[in-house]
Image (tube, rainbow, N blue to C red):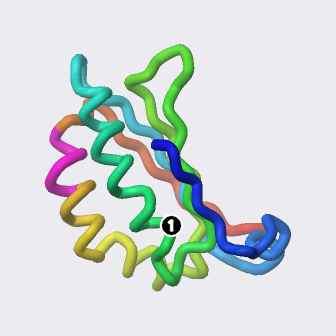
Amino acid sequence: MKHYAMSTRTISDVINTSGLLVVAQWEAKEGQADKVAAILDGFLPEAQKDPGTKLFLIGRGKDNPAQFLFYELFQDKAAFKAHAESAYFKTYIAEQALPLLAKRERTQYVLL
């Protein structure tokens, strides 16, 4: 996961408006972490260029590389729904990554 593409918008441009913040934590099954990372390497650029996505970052645990943290900011609930129903999400996440996970948690937040 080498690319964290941002447009010419600044962070303050991204967060100074309303949006739906989603934080997800994954843990790969034993021996599957590198496969999950490779899948996410293809998924991330697609998620970042989605028109309803304001910010999309994925981190991998320093101490435990089987752990992944997603920090996702969408324009609104409709944008999040469109992301979850997209072809790239279904391919990379639903079909390829989820079967390799031991744990998956997601929480939604509203920006203050």
Residue at the image point whose x is 74% and y is 72% from the top: 14
Q: Is residue 72 left or right of residue 103?
A: right
**The quadrant where residue 74 appears:** bottom right
Nearer to the camera, 77 or 34: 34
* Residue nearest the viewer, comparing 54 with 75: 54
Coordinates of residue 94 in the picture (x, y in percent): 21, 57
Q: Amino acid at mark 1?
A: Gln
Q: Residue 77's spot in the image, x, y percent? A: 51, 79
Question: What residue is drawn where x is 30% and y is 28%?
Answer: 34
Q: Is residue 30 magenta?
A: no
The residue at 31%/27% (across/down) is 33
Horizontal and vertical percent for residue 31?
A: 22, 18
Q: Residue furthest top?
A: 63
Q: Identify the residue position indicated by label 1 in the image.
A: 48
Main SS of the magenta part reads helix
In the image, is residue 52 above or below residue 41? Answer: below
